[in-house]
Amino acid sequence: MTDPLNELKGEILKDPALILDDPEVMRALLLSDDEAKGGNVVDLRGAFVTRLEERLNKLEDTHRTVIAAAYENLAGTNQIHRAILALLDAETFDDFLQAMKMDVANILAVDVIHLCLESDKADGGKAIGPDGPLKETVIALPLNGVSAYITGGRNRATRQVTLRTASEAKAAVFGPSNTVQSEAILRLDLGPNNPQGLVAFGSSDPNRFAADQGTELLAFFAQTLERILRRWVT
């Protein structure tokens, strides 16, 4: 009759990694070794192994966090690239506005996107887009209205990308009946002889945009918008 103990011993000797790679088995072996020594013996090796195990667990957690962040960044990059390609396909200004209103809004998962341009001929908040369903897509701001909206009227520099809870003045950009709870504001430099502008992304989710989020991808998107819009906005 085969001895089960000898069989187990043989399997372990053929592949010791079965034991060495199993943390639960190794922990049980160390505990049994400690019990055999009694309470008057301090096993520094066991303490060292425990410390290493704790560090390994922390490293694994950090590794998972880094991998998750990398995937999230890759997904965000893909979204921005798809949105830019949708805008580059536009052959006319109307096509551009339609792509921004529908395609880009869907790709970036926002509820509304408005292009706002400074004008000395219209009051702030007035829709000045092409007649029809795209009219509300372009909003007029008074002169210096871009800076005023981004900074809230405070005397400070305007960043190219601002992520925040929706401004109290949001009706000037999104309309009086909006449900926007958070917003991304992209300042646009359309050239010295062109009106200054901004693109506003609005979301009904209060956590969609926040000041502690990264802005690099949206800054790249804003720079692309500037180059596209210079073809039509004068």
Image: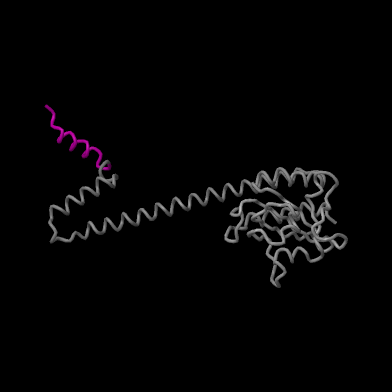
Q: Nearer the viewer, residue 108 or 170?
A: 170
The residue positioned 82% from the left and 56% from the top of the image is 126
> In the current view of this chain or complex, which residue is farthest to the top?
1
Give the magenta part as a residue range. Answer: 1-17
What colour-coding does the image apply?
A: one colour
In the rendered image, residue 223 lying in the magenta stretch gets the answer no
Residue 179, image x, y percentages: 68, 52
- In the rendered image, the quadrant that contains the C terminus is bottom right
**Residue 91 percent coordinates (x, y):** 81, 43
The residue positioned 51% from the left and 52% from the top of the image is 69
Q: Residue at x 19, y 59 (%)?
A: 43
Task: Give the mark count.
Answer: 0
Along the line of sight, the residue nearer the viewer: 144 or 60: 144
Determine whether, in the image, residue 13 is placed left or right of residue 108: left
Residue 11 painted magenta: yes
Question: Quadrant location of residue 146?
Answer: bottom right
Residue at the far bottom in the pictured view: 155
User: Where's residue 67, x and y in %?
Assistant: 48, 50
Which residue appears farthest toward the front when viewing the image?
177
Return the x and y of residue 7 as percentages of the image width and height. Answer: 17, 33
Vertical side of 108 occupied by 156: above or below: below
The answer to whether 6 is drawn above or below residue 55 in the figure is above
Q: Could you tell me what secondary structure mostly forms the magenta stretch? A: helix
Q: Quadrant of the N terminus?
A: top left
Q: Going by the image, does 99 lie left or right of 56?
A: right
In the image, is 87 to the left or to the right of 194? Answer: left
In this orientation, which residue lies closer to the viewer: 195 or 177? 177
* The image quarter in which residue 95 lies: top right
